[in-house]
Amino acid sequence: MANTETALKEALTSIEGTTGVALVDYTSGMALGTMGGSKSFDLNVAAAGNTDVIRAKMRTMEMLGLKGEIEDILISLSDQYHLIRLLKSRGGNGLFLYLVLDASRANLAMARHQLKKIEEDLEV
């Protein structure tokens, strides 16, 4: 089992094209940990903003009566992928992993697979 810092470091170093990663509490919008990012890309601001994405999707699913669980949410920009993975592991309720990828270097299928593995090993 990996702690938060170890899991974030693993995501940043092992997932090709990753430029930033965060563990976020979507009930409060607070990042519990971040790695990467840049002066022009504040992971704390992005983490808080993406909590609204999750809340909106959950409300929509409820209104539609959808019973499935969200695995991940992908936002594709012209030069980046933003991958939001809700934690299902024990103790991970209300949390998500947020990954920012350089689209020119990333393999999206592999990133999703590796992020799922990191989630499984994460101890919150």
Image (cartoon, rainbow, N blue to C red):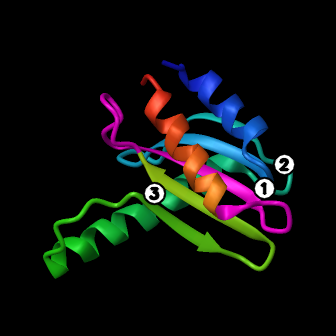
Q: Which quadrant: the C terminus?
A: top left
Q: Amino acid at mark 1?
A: Phe
Circle 1 SS class: loop
**For mark 3, does the 10 Å Cα neighbourhood hold few (<14), some (14 to 19), or many (20 or more) residues?**
many
Q: Which mark is residue 10?
A: none
Q: Amino acid at mark 2?
A: Ser
* Cα gap from disc 2 to disc 3, whole angstroms: 20 Å
Residue 60 to residue 53: above or below? below
Which residue is labeled 1 in the image?
Answer: 41
Circle 3 SS class: helix
Is 94 in the magenta?
yes
> Residue 88 is drawn in which quadrant?
top left
Residue 108 placement (x, y as % from top left): 66, 63
Q: Are marks 1 and 2 in contact (CB under 8 Å)?
A: yes
Which residue is labeled 3 in the image?
Answer: 51
> Residue 28 is drawn in which quadrant?
top left
Magenta-colored span: 87-108
**For mark 2, does the 10 Å Cα neighbourhood hold few (<14), some (14 to 19), or many (20 or more) residues?**
few
Residue at 44%, 22% in the rendered image: 123
Residue 72 to residue 75: above or below? above
**For mark 1, does the 10 Å Cα neighbourhood hold few (<14), some (14 to 19), or many (20 or more) residues?**
few
Q: Amino acid at mark 3?
A: Thr
Residue 110 placement (x, y as % from top left): 65, 55
Residue at 56%, 50% in the rendered image: 113
Q: Which mark is residue 38?
A: 2
